[in-house]
Amino acid sequence: MTTTAETMRKLTYREAVREAIREAMQKDERVFLMGEDVGRYGGCFAVSKGLFDEFGPERIRDTPLSESGFVGAGIGAALGGMRPIVEIMTVNFSLLAADQIINNAAVLLHMSGGLFNVPIVIRLATGGGRQVAAQHSRSLEGWYAHIPGLKVLTPATVEDARGMLWTALEDPDPVLIFENSGLYNMEGTLPVEAGAVDIDRARMRRPGRDITIISYAASLFKALEAAEILAREGIEAEVIDLRTLRPLDDTTLLDSVARTHRALIVDEGWRSGSLAAEISARIMEGAFYELDAPVERLCSAEVPLPYAKHLEDAALPQVDKIVDLVRTMVGGHG
């Protein structure tokens, strides 16, 4: 009889991503990693630490500080038959490569009449909460989820951080993986034989009957913590992890709302023109007559994210804000 210790193991989110990269490079010689400081330094967030010594400079490639240049090189490598993993240090710097991502990678299949796929995977650190101020704390994954031709992944769990990469590398089209930098130190358990996971479906992380809380990445864990607090008050919240922002899994979202009849979307992006607004509209279009209350959104304050910790905390969605909003939405109907 096998014990839990023999079938499960502990590792951090950072280690899970590193394992995923290592396994992909071992399985397919076409896979390589490129980006700023990914080589001897081991990556800005230490994700690629040790991989340079293992695979060498041909497959762990340090690049100049030119996001447009090295993302363009990655697109060219993908067109040439390689399977590049391009690391952009933070999502903020992806704006320097937006032309390559949006005007090249996302449209080449269409512009070529279906002749040229671009099998590139771009990894980006995203999110606030680390006191690194406005230029390093944005959550822009909702922007990229607006773009046809891209797939946008937001792994929250160690299992998804470990398993989504290989599935993304097998996709013939561009995939962006947004890794919330606040999760890198998070520990989780993973089956010893863990492998690839799907990138198509949202997941119910907690069942409930009174309200659906929809979130992703670091905010998912705030939603789960809030659900625990609410459960002690007799309010059972169902928590949905989006996992993939484009394409959105409408079926899972609408099925959940049909069970709970209320929906709250927790999104670290800004409220105006947000991913939360898109999800709210889809719920209104697809499940309007199931709703017992208006859909609500909890987003970041519409300011550049402050450096001071108390101001940063006030600007981001937090557990107490989720709890208070759910109490108001459910009222005496829990």
Image (spheres, rainbow, N blue to C red):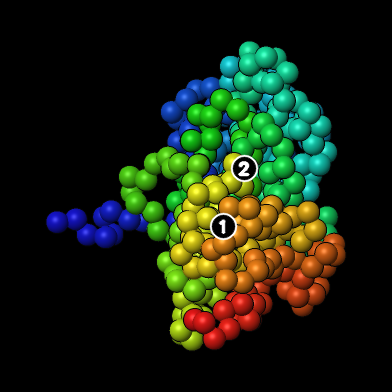
Q: Give me the residue at 69% from left, 34% from top.
A: 148
Q: What element carries label 1?
A: helix
Residue drawn at point x = 61 percent, y = 71 percent = 293
Question: Type of residue at label 1?
Answer: Ala
Looking at the image, which residue sits at the far front? 289
| Mark 2 to mark 1 CA distance (whole Å) | 20 Å
Q: Vertically, is 233 above or below 26?
A: below
Label number found at residue 287: 1
User: Compared to 167, does 284 lie above or below?
Assistant: below
In the displayed structure image, the side of residue 254 where residue 321 appears, left or right: right
Q: Is residue 15 above or below residue 325?
A: above
Residue 35 appears left or right of 55:
right
Q: Position of residue 120 (x, y in %)?
A: 62, 29
Badge 1 local density, few (<14 within 10 Å), some, or many (20+)? Answer: some
Q: What element carries label 2?
A: strand
Where is residue 68 drawn, in percent x and y? 80, 32
Do we see residue 95 in this rendering?
Answer: yes
Q: Which amino acid does the dot numbered 2 rest on? A: Arg
Tell me if residue 146 comes above or below residue 233 in the rendering: above
Residue 11 position within the rendered picture, expressed as x and y whole percent measured from the top left: 45, 56
Which-is-in-front pick, marks 2 and 1? 1
Question: In the figure, residue 219 lies in which quadrant?
Answer: bottom right
Q: Residue 246 carries which label?
A: 2
In the current view of this chain or complex, which residue is farthest to the right?
303
